[in-house]
Image (cartoon, grey):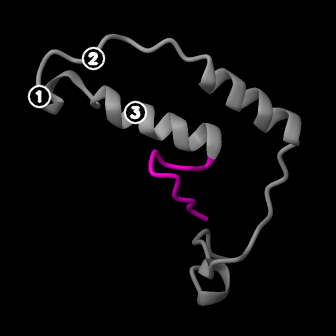
Amino acid sequence: MSDRTDNSAATTAVRPFAVEIPEAEIEALRARIAATRWPEKETVGDASQGVPLVVIQELARYWATGTTGAGARRN
């Protein structure tokens, strides 16, 4: 008997799965995102101080609403 894991195509194939998250949990997350207290804009024009504020705000907006600033919807 071998201790090796079977790496055949059957065990490494991508299989669909479902995630069930209660709507109340999603709404609570959206509320926490909407309540974010943002820092002042960074003082440099590059990423040396981390992710630019405008980028992270756009990401938070997408998480909270599912849309980008332009109103586009991604699925």
**What residue did someone put label 3 on?**
56
- Residue 61, given in percent of the width and then of the height, sits at 53, 37
Of 73 and 46, which appears nearest the observer?
A: 73
Q: Which mark is residue 41?
A: 2
Residue 32 located within the stretch drawn in magenta: no
The number of callouts visible is: 3
Q: Which SS class for mark 3? A: helix
Say which amino acid is labelled 2.
Lys
Q: Is residue 58 left or right of residue 50?
A: right
**What residue did someone put label 1 on?**
45
- In three-dimensional space, the C-alpha distance between marks 3 and 1, rounded to whole angstroms, equals 15 Å
- In three-dimensional space, the C-alpha distance between marks 3 and 2, rounded to whole angstroms, equals 11 Å
Judge the density around disc 1: few (<14), some (14-19), many (≥20) Cα neighbours within 10 Å.
few
Say which amino acid is labelled 1.
Gly
Residue 65 in the image: above or below residue 48: below
Q: Is residue 41 left or right of residue 8?
A: left
> What secondary structure is the magenta-colored segment mainly?
loop
Q: Which residue appears at 46% of the width and 45% of the height?
A: 69
Considering only order in the chain, which callout, 1 or 3, is on the residue closer to the N terminus? 1
Q: Are marks 1 and 2 in contact (CB under 8 Å)?
A: no
Of 2 and 47, which appears nearest the observer?
A: 47
- Residue 68, given in percent of the width and then of the height, sits at 49, 48
Residue 69 located within the stretch drawn in magenta: yes
- Residue 17, given in percent of the width and then of the height, sits at 77, 67
- In three-dimensional space, the C-alpha distance between marks 1 and 2, rounded to whole angstroms, equals 10 Å
Q: Which residues are magenta?
A: 66-75
Say which amino acid is labelled 3.
Ile
